Image: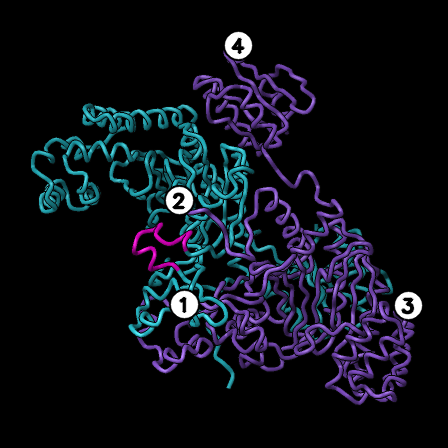
Chain colours: A purple, B cyan
Amino acid sequence: MAQKPSIPKGTRDFSPAEVAKRNYIFSTIKTNFEKFGFQPIETPSFENSETLMGKYGEEGDRLIFKILNSGDYLAKADATLLENRDSLKLTSHISEKALRYDLTVPFARYVVQHQNEIEFPFKRYQIQPVWRADRPQKGRFREFYQCDADVVGSNSLWQEVELVQLYDSVFSQLGLGGVTIKINNRKILSGIAEVIGASDKLIDFTVALDKLDKIGEDGVKKEMLEKGISETAIEIVQPLFNFTGTINEKIEKLAQLLANSEEGMKGVNELQFICDNVTTLGLQTAFLDLDVTLARGLNYYTGAIFEVAAPKGVAMGSIGGGGRYDDLTGIFGLKNMSGVGISFGLDRIALVMEEVGLFPEAVLATSKALFLNFGDKEALYSMKAIGKLRQKGIKVELYPDKSKIDKQFKHADRRGIPFAVIVGESEIEREEFGLKNLATGEQQKVDFATLVTLLQ
Amino acid sequence: MAQKPSIPKGTRDFSPAEVAKRNYIFSTIKTNFEKFGFQPIETPSFENSETLMGKYGEEGDRLIFKILNSGDYLAKADATLLENRDSLKLTSHISEKALRYDLTVPFARYVVQHQNEIEFPFKRYQIQPVWRADRPQKGRFREFYQCDADVVGSNSLWQEVELVQLYDSVFSQLGLGGVTIKINNRKILSGIAEVIGASDKLIDFTVALDKLDKIGEDGVKKEMLEKGISETAIEIVQPLFNFTGTINEKIEKLAQLLANSEEGMKGVNELQFICDNVTTLGLQTAFLDLDVTLARGLNYYTGAIFEVAAPKGVAMGSIGGGGRYDDLTGIFGLKNMSGVGISFGLDRIALVMEEVGLFPEAVLATSKALFLNFGDKEALYSMKAIGKLRQKGIKVELYPDKSKIDKQFKHADRRGIPFAVIVGESEIEREEFGLKNLATGEQQKVDFATLVTLLQ
């Protein structure tokens, strides 16, 4: 019995059209990464388990795909663990390698391992797949690409300024104008925690505040009280309930609110520097906004936090994010190596571009012409022309079989190939080519030079 | 204690310089694949185990990396297998997914699964990593890229002609002139087996014959006798011991030798068609040669067999290979779908190009200029220029910190950045830029328009 072919849930096959579209996005991102001075690295798909485990929290550890040791992996496995069927503890005995969960930890490992070869500050980008044993759902996959750009080895806030510009540059070039680059700062969040006197309630606080648009001020306050945030605290942060206006007005409000928090004021000053310079330099099509509810990556970001929202009117979560982390490489023994980076959410960007219809037609890059096949003699004559056309960089094909001409025309049509070239005996005699425009039906006899011109 | 970072044996990190070189090869191969009408697909990194297992022989099964099931994978495991520590049999109970071992089986699975969406003949290319739990050694890795181009759905020998041209086109464009594209045919091997009256000894026969250069005619004959090939048989194939001359002369010798083998004569005719047409159409820099000892992929190739040898003088095994297979998709339930394909050995091609010094300097694509950082005011002035330069596609960078100028110059030097741009107070006043050529030491003051011209 033949197997009915399928692929694991949460994974995808990509057809030529899908690959072409994804490559268009990759290539736009890469071009911009390089324009901004970032250089590519690549790391192995699997790492030693100890490199990855314990870096993403308990939930993360669970979602890491483990690779079974080769050979007789049970030979030395602990008898008690086997007997007790202790899956969790047995894992490290029968598996030493695991698939990459993100690009950040492998990058930290890379920096530490190659620190003597790297010239710091090191601006690297990395575009590779990662794997997570997550429950698959719409837009969430078990294998997906991450596109990261990071700088390590410099505290300069000019990096944050450049990363905002980089987002703007990529999305503008993709035709995705009007994205909002939301910015916040870990130190401002710490300041707010100080002010409300409850750093353990910070997440509850930001989650509640984030619902302001949906459930209104009273609703938010009710939720905050329920979560154990005191009425006094809520009163102090009253300005955050009317947190509107320009970025500068928002920063001004924060400066007043956090005046007594040293950490908070550091955050205010950092934000001020970044926003002032981004504003002075200008953005092409993106908007910059300050969002104090932005609290992603709270356990490792130490300074700026970024998130990119799709243009208004497109229902889609964040299409990018990032931030500054002061001690990423510390886990591998290299201290004081501040880093800052951003990431592009390829799958969501592709969905948005598809929805808005932003992929150029030319992305597909099919052949320019299909030479029809009337037999070996005609095919040889065609192949001579095809060889010369290809040397000029023109994509052309010979239909491989002497099939019915209808079938060959249909093939060109289904493949989206715009021209058919017809070579019969009379064309060979006169050293000509019949060129048919498959969109208009127009047909003409041309010599080789004209053929080149028309297909170029 | 911080972990000392390392990567699993047989895997590699790729530095910016290495990625750039590999991308240069990938991109040359891709351009040519597309010029010849091939379209890209991508398949998941891991497949359901049953898709892969049993397709590569027992040794192959052993070398496939298996992924441990998520969660409580031992819960339903067979008690006896656990007790007996039967690693081999337990595997299918605790692992349902496995990393791709090559691109051919996933391609066959793809074709069958998507047969209703595919327009045949289907010319696809695929450039993705594969994984093998092989013992790592020089030039052999546990993670490496395969670059495959295949056509399925046509028996036409014009495909073989085109694939030879495709090899020639890629290697010529890479500057790797003088490769030898060796060709053979499975049917000729079958014919030889018929003639020597021992199809089970075919591999022993070709392996022995392949040593002709090294151990001479007598040595080869001795080995053949030892392997149980009869003296009569060896006498019959005597022409193969003087198998020299042009391809046509070789084909002529085969035609005489295999005159009584129907299968063998089919192979001769196929070879004749391919070689005649390749010769008539001409190759740019590659040589075509007929090698009857070529027996790769014997268990699945049914027609042409290809292998590419590096240019003479470069000690390296084959840098490419391929062939025709008549029933690749049969294992997944789709019969009569003939295919033919070739593969490029990226790692070996990279090694050869490194050895011969064929990578263009421009491959590295570092920034064109580093703007030195004299402080925030100067940096802002620089960033205005940098933004405009980047919009023109020119790669430039700002040194992020106001470090000692020596250190900044050294950074540009170590990164291989050719120009430094110096912006101090006087430059800002006069709306100028100091441009220093770091190779010659030459320095000049220029306005923005001139800066653009000089960096473009």
As rendered, which of A60 and A152 lies closer to the eye? A60
Q: Amino acid at mark 1?
A: Leu
Q: Quadrant of the C terminus of chain A?
A: top right
Q: Nearer the viewer, mark 4 or mark 1?
A: 1
- Give the percent coordinates (x, y) of residue B451: 76, 54
Indicate which disc, 1 or 2, sits on the residue closer to the N terminus. Answer: 2
Does the magenta segment cover residue B54?
yes
Indicate which disc, 2 or 3, sits on the residue closer to the N terminus. Answer: 2
Question: Label 1: which residue?
Answer: A68
Tell me if residue A199 can be seen.
yes
Q: Residues within 10 Å of mark 3 (few under 14, many from 20)?
A: few
Q: Amino acid at mark 4?
A: Ser
Q: Nearer the viewer, mark 1 or mark 2?
A: 2
Image check: A272 left or right of A321? right
- The label shown at residue A246 is 3
Q: Residues within 10 Å of mark 2 (few under 14, many from 20)?
A: few
Q: Which residues, given as a range, are shown in magenta?
A: B50-64
